[in-house]
Image: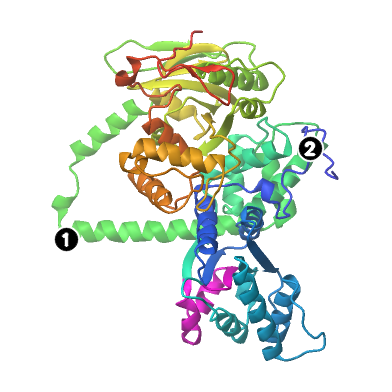
Amino acid sequence: MDTLYANHFQLREAAFSIAPNPRFLFMSEQHREALAHLLYGIEHGSGFVLLTGEVGTGKTTLCRCLLEKIPADVDVAFIINPRLTVVELLANICDELNIGYPSDTQSNRTLIDAINHYLLAKHAEGRKTVLIIDEAQNLDGDVLEQLRLLTNLETDECKLLQIILLGQPELQHKLAQPELRQLSQRITARYHLQALSQYEISAYITHRLSVAGCNEPIFNAAAERYIHHISQGIPRLINLICDRAMLGAYAKSVKNIDRAMTRQASREVLGQNTAQTNRNRRNAAVSWAALAVAMLLIAVFVLDEDLLPPPAQQETVSVVIKHEIPQPEPKPIPRPVKTVVDNKQPEQAWAWPENVGITQSRTLAFRALFAAWGMVMPDSVKPCDYAVSEGFACLRQIGDLGRLRSLNRPVVLPWQNDAGEIVNIAVISLDGATAKVVLGGKQVQIPLTVLRQHWMETFTLLWRTPEAYSGDILPGTVGPSAKWLNQRLAELDPSLSKQSISGIYQGRWVHRVRQFQRETGLPPNGAAGPQTLIRLTTALHAPGPRLLPEPEIHTSTHAETNPTNKKPVAGSNHVLHP
């Protein structure tokens, strides 16, 4: 590894390289959905599948990930340079698929015939052929038309050639032109990748550091907010800024990166005027927004003064807000943290334990998380590596209390103290307006209002993985994990239990997963990823700790031994003692 700061941050490899390495792909909800669209198009023999997104949003990396998940019976041609003539494109396709043709040919017909013979032969062998074209916005109109003609070869059930187009937003505009309407009508799946939100950036940075071998927080919250502001959520720019900021931290012999260091890094990689340009854009946007609001208020006042709330009502709202969101005065850590549950009850006080550092807080938090599952995490191990050895996996997520409640599992989450440091705590249960948490190894009850104020809205939970699980269970998956999923679906739906349960995840099983995803508020893409599987096991009352109280389940004992694990797992009524 050639990164100067590798040993300084205990990295195995560069965490923020801009090379499209699929191992570093941050699978946000939209990336999972986009991948499901691509795999669905391949499975069902669609003509064209379209994936677009701004420069640097991860299209190529997602495509590399797709190549690793493509079934063994699929042959792929991958074109990365689309600035080609029709003859050059056809010749490239032949080269990618090892189709023989005269080396000196300039005849479209010769190349097309060779491709058609190949497609027919592969179809007879039961194989599929997929053509993937990156940077497809650079394709000329006559080349796009030739691609459409290539998909004319088909059977009664499917196209013999499936084409995936990856491109920038301009590709959508090009395909909307009247002369390309025939191609546009053949696009059976479309997906547009958006930039990362502010909340997703923290998880993105944590994910890439973790893959590279570093599980310690490096960028503080202020630094992450600035990275989102200056990068506009574009992963490639995030990588450039983070890489340069870490180099700057290495030069200063520090391991925690703040806003000032990321600001300096952004100037070095994006140019001196970037920050001022963004400020000018923001100021212009604010000015127009303020003008629009002022004109709206004037119009409302002129049309009907009764629509404005009376002064007394406005004052009442102000008082309520002050009571609901108390603003504690900043004091050095450690210190008592005063919280008010309501105006009629006395204050509760709790304090961050003394002599508990940032690194130690993470170890103690994960130790409490494993304890909630009835396991003892050994010393000197990486929590998520230990989880895998016990038949579990770590799931890192972005979200608020609503997301926590929907997943309904104990979590470890980043907690920002008043000194701006990021420590880790374990949230063991939620009950009404309070949360049971482990702070530095000590269990306390804190109001949810305090939890929201200090929480960075990212978290990590443990979940038990199916047998032989290696990733999302996608339509067409064959093996133990597919059979496990089908068995769980049969438990959930009695109508399915009457049918034979195979080891292939397809057909009625995929339909039932989509139905379950709709019922639980997930994208109904049929891809059974961690969120779907966690909600499924919850619906089946599988053993394990829960965040939310479940009185109807507490009447029985839920400890059992997982066939894939040697250690018993605590039931949902497990109580962690300090």
Residues shaded magenta:
159-187
Judge from the rendering whether residue 107 lies leftward or rightward of residue 319; answer left or right: right
Mark 2 crowdedness (10 Å alpha carbons): few <14, some 14-19, many ≥20: some
In this orientation, does residue 532 appear?
A: no
Q: Position of residue 449 (x, y in %)?
A: 39, 26
Please name the residue shown 61% across and 25% down the image: 390
The mark found on residue 335 in the picture is: none
The mark found on residue 303 in the picture is: 1
Q: Is residue 319 above or below residue 442?
A: below
- The answer to if 183 sits in the magenta stretch is yes
Question: Depth check: 348 or 306 in front?
Answer: 348
Q: Is residue 190 above or below residue 548?
A: below
Question: Depth check: 232 or 397 in front?
Answer: 397
Judge from the rendering whether residue 282 lies leftward or rightward of residue 2; answer left or right: left
First in residue order: circle 1 vs circle 2: 2
Residue type, label 2: Arg
Dot 1 falls on a residue whose secondary structure is helix
Please name the residue shown 85% across and 41% down the image: 4
Question: Depth check: 435 or 257 in front?
Answer: 435
Q: Quadrant of the N terminus?
A: top right
CA gap between label 1 and label 2 equals 66 Å
In this orientation, does residue 432 appear?
A: yes
Tag 1 near tag 2, CB within 8 Å: no
Please name the residue shown 46% across and 59% down the image: 285
Which residue in the structure is indicated by mark 2?
A: 12
Q: Is residue 80 above or below residue 266?
A: below
Q: Position of residue 373 (x, y in %)?
A: 51, 19
